[in-house]
Image: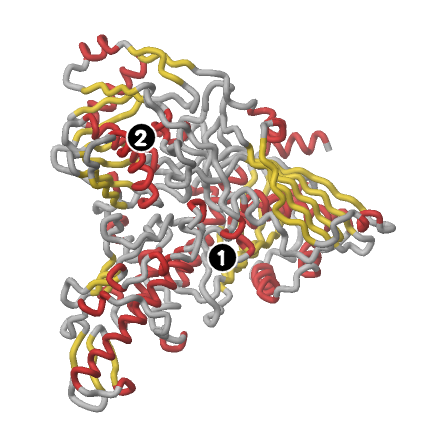
Amino acid sequence: MNALARGFSSGSLPANPQLKQWLSFDREGLVTLKVGKVEIGQGITTALQQIAADELDLRIDQVHMASVSTDDSPDEGVTSGSYSVQHSGAAVRQACATLRALAVAAFCERFGEEAQSVRVQEGRVHSTASVHHSSYWELDMHPLLEQAVSADATPKQHAQLTLVGRSVPRTDLARKVFGQPAFIHDLVLPQMLHGRVVRVPNPAARLRSVDEESFRSAWPGVMLVRDGSFLAVLAEREETAVRAAARLAVLAQWELPASLPDAAALPGFLRQTPSEARTVAKLGPVHDALDGRAGARVFEAGYLRPFLAHASIGPSCALAHWTDDCLEVWTHSQGIFNVRAELAVFVQREFAGRALPRIVVHHAEGSGCYGHNPADDVAFDAVLLARAARGRPVRVLWTRADELGCGPFGPAHLVELRAVVSPAGALLALDQTIWSNGYTARPGRAAPGTLSFLAASALEDGFAAPVSLDPPASVGGGADRNAVPLYDIGRVNVTAHRLLEMPLRTSAIRALGGYTNIFALESFLDEIAADTGQDPIALRLNHLNDPRAHEVIRRAVGAAPWWSGEREEGVGHGFAYARYKNTGAWCAVALRIRAAETIQVLDVSAAVDVGLVVNPDGVRNQIEGGVVQSCSWTLKEAVRFSRTEVTTRSWGDYSILGFSDAPRVEVALVERPSEPSVGAGEAAQGPTAAAIGNAVAHALGVRIRELPITFERVLSALASD
């Protein structure tokens, strides 16, 4: 499998074909479900329990979810791309259908019954034609688990399902709501040491010197750890580590090159940095004859997104324990198998010529976010400090400043569009050009000789830091995600430029390039509609022949009572549509904003089609969460930096949407139980951004093409207009 496609491709079953990799019966009355997809707040644990319980005829509380670990979980790659229900859910459904069929066959063989007379309820198997009864646990299913998942096993039809399609309460929330230990931050290991790393927010920075003698005299009970430019402390107590690290930072001298781009000239940086051009799509006529059609008009516009931080509410945390024969790591990474693979590269170098320790990586939930946040980086920090801890486990927690300033960012992203429109308003041609750093530098995907962990390049004998790549278009792409329009357009050319230099670390952020590309195209369509006197929704419908697209558009607008209401001063509405990755969920967003001292999104009406809905509340929550996150990105968020360092170091520097700014969100689900499930998690971000931009233009008559859409930019546009 292409390393860049791990977690995106539907390889869950081919890579893990045996039943025992998915299921076990070690506890009476319970079936243990083992998966490789991890809970990161999206509710996947509950959805997979629903699928398994339905196929096995169990109550949901009879399905026990095993902790995800590289030791005993199927390797399903990375939890990303909104693929968990689509891929892992399909694998779980097939594995459970296989096991149920084997259990029924075993019951029939033992008691001489006919399969059509056998029923299963809450794991108990009985015959309607006799008094014979048994259960999964009494039938001794362990030998059957050695078999492969059967492609011939028939999962239940939708009419037979009792849990899938219902809003089952999230099974992971109670302990979080009631303050019980739930996150990796709560994990305590015996004799644990506490570590803090001292670093500066520039990937090219190098440690020039540190006054170690002064530090050791002031902190005799604290271990100073230095390897090249990797600088850290280890202490018995966390508060001691915090204070010691703060003192060590004062005693360290760094070389800070002016290697970061000019923040005031991002378009120039993106266009002028050496890049690799790639033709994403070339559809329709290869020449420009359409451009010369009598009366045709040409439209051009550019759209820019800044660098974005993940801005996890809980800073990244990890634990590691390194003994002679085992390296054990606890992390909230979305790709624990990838982390293990990259740790193996480091360990092989460290143990050259010696017996290698076994590497085990466990997932523990973080209070973070989606995308390549610093979870992987802090795991490697913990490994480096555990190496120095002489057999004691180590816990490392990043600071808020490092979380915002040193983790991988979502790349700055520039889109330039050119369209040719007929006198009747038809889209004859569209050219799209993209400039961006790559959208993935996750562990396990880098070229040989490189390691993706932040500290790997800081070591004395350091590894090269990889330049971010893009996932292939076959699994949704990266910078080019959603760049190819699904509208009926005569000619389409899409070119993407991936930057070959990376002065700021970039990697996966939720929705990847789909957020900016949808923002650009859907804003551009509204601009064309306004200039040609067309209704913006009619323009879209006239260029769409997909009935599922028409339905979500109709549902989103139809559920917005304010859409056709009287105009209010400073109030406007906007609309946008996309099918995420062109293969995932269909999503349309209509929203209303008020522009006063700030721009506030008041109401959002979203409609989504994800095929078979496993958990309606789960889908609504994902769409609502995507809407709110997009409001924050679109109206507030931007990483700030000088030529020598990232200056975004606190919540005061990096504004996010507050509770008082959150809009009212209504989500309509288009139920299609006969269609396969597709992911909902990232479908709303792009349409919400474009709908906000379109609503601002509707309210104020000015178009803002550079994100975030701040009131300062609006005032500047009004003044220049």
Q: CA distance from mark 1 to mark 2?
A: 36 Å
Q: Nearer the viewer, residue 643 or 356?
A: 356
Residue 455 falls in which quadrant of the image?
top left
Q: Is residue 649 shown above or below 536?
A: above
Give the residue pinned by disc 1: 666
On screen, 114 above or below 70? below
- Front label number (1 vs 2): 2
Q: Which residue is mark 2?
A: 398
Residue 253 point in image, percent of width and height: 35, 12
The three-letter code of the residue at mark 2 reads Trp
Q: Outermost residue toward the left?
A: 191
Residue 305 in view in this figure: no
Q: Earlier in the sequence, mark 1 or mark 2?
A: 2
Task: Measuring from the top left, give residue 287's x and y in whole percent.
Answer: 77, 48
Name, please, the residue furthest toward the bottom. 129
| Mark 1: amino acid | Glu
Q: Identify which residue is drawn at 83% across, 53% down.
A: 423
What residue do we see at 22% from left, 31% from top?
A: 353
Q: Residue at x 32, y 52 (%)?
A: 75
